[in-house]
Image: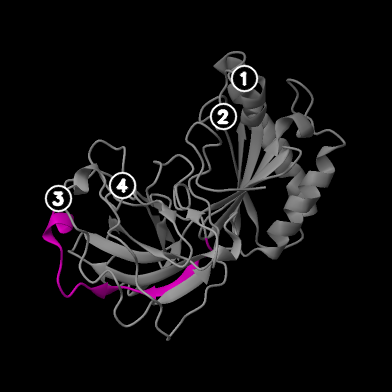
Amino acid sequence: MLILSGSPTAWRPLRIAIPLIAASFLLTSCVSGGGDDAGDSDQQQDQDGPSGASGNDGPLATSLSTSTSYGSNLQLDINTLERESDDVVVLEMTATNVSENDSVTFDYALVAADGTYRTPDGVTLVDTANRERYFPLMNTDGSTCLCSGYENNSIIPAGESLDIWVAFPAPPDDVTSVAVATPATPDFMNIPLSDASNPDDNIANATVEDPRILPLSGFQDDIDGTTSREESGDETSILLSSDVLFELNESDLTPDADEALEQVAAEIDASSGEEIKIDGYTDNSGSDAINNPLSEERAESVRDRLAELVTREGVSFEVAGHGSSDPVADNGTDEGREKNRRVTVTFGK
């Protein structure tokens, strides 16, 4: 199961998940423009949205939805991605119902998992060069994005369209293209970022919360819950359940530990990292006087076995025990405590 953009109350390593990157189709032909005005969110009651929303030269890219119940009835076009100021860029899109008969209810199509109904707050920009994901700018109350809402026309009749825009923190000046990820479509690659010919001062100068920009990392949790992994730009971290590696309150490896450690060793052999970090953790049961040395002894046991299994030359190991510090789950539940009892092996790719 691939977990994306995880909640801070879940596994803490879930800093950002990466659905990079499905196919999109670049077009040169003209696609019809949007329909009625997209409506206003609370902060945009006096804003008409950015200028040039129709994408006069045709869309930069388009995709038919394949990941939602809309199937091929929903087409999403990327019209423009422009810098409104040094700090703000605006993405303009058009959603089109290409069905000949059926309406499309667009209420949740672009909403984030924890987002606001009838807003495009689930759309993100991915700076693949710097490996960062940009989330929509949020109004100061934190409830809605700086974006178009579509409260009055979220149902798109057959053959009609809806124009949408959403503002983001601006990537660095040297970034000339990004990927666009939406909950409803495959991701769009290499969308060019240009300067707005007629910047919208209301959007460029809007009062918003601090920008949310997170490093890209992928996190995968095995079905049986015994191992997990986090992928960042240049590192891999494998989280091994102590309940599989050790008996209760023991630091000697169990017979079941070898299978998991053999797989870790094979990945280390295939990697380029020379320093392997091994960190032991416990749940918050018991005292630090017990947990701290136990976590370090368990990390040392994993190190000793990996040193036997890894065949690549030039590899060194760094070991640390952290006791119950830095939990990745809720110690108030049995499931959370089980996840917190772990040994993490980290190495360069």
Q: Write down the region rendered in magenta.
A: 185-205
Colour pattern of the rendering? one colour
**Quadrant in the picture for residue 291:** top right
Q: Position of residue 317 (x, y in %)?
A: 63, 48
Packing grade of label 1 (10 A; few <14, some 14-19, many >=20) is: few
Of 279 and 327, nearer the camera is 327
Up-down: is 287 above or below 139?
above
Q: Are marks 1 and 2 in contact (CB under 8 Å)?
A: yes
Distance Cα–Cα, label 3 vs label 1: 48 Å
First in sequence: mark 2 or mark 3?
Answer: 3
Residue wearing tag 2:
329
Q: Amino acid at mark 1?
A: Thr
Mark yes or no: residue 131 visible.
yes
Distance Cα–Cα, label 1 vs label 2: 9 Å
Mark yes or no: residue 349 visible.
no
First in sequence: mark 4 or mark 3?
Answer: 3
Task: Give the farthest residue toward the front.
Answer: 101
First in sequence: mark 3 or mark 1?
Answer: 3
Q: Amino acid at mark 3?
A: Asp
First in sequence: mark 2 or mark 4?
Answer: 4
Up-down: is 205 above or below 305?
below
Residue wearing tag 4:
145
Foreground mark, 3 or 1, reads 3
Foreground mark, 4 or 1, reads 4
Residue wearing tag 3:
46
Distance Cα–Cα, label 2 vs label 3: 44 Å
Residue wearing tag 1:
333
Residue at horizontal 70%, vertical 43%? 303
Distance Cα–Cα, label 2 vs label 4: 29 Å
Residue at horizontal 65%, vertical 62%? 314
Q: Amino acid at mark 2?
A: Ala
Q: Amino acid at mark 4?
A: Cys
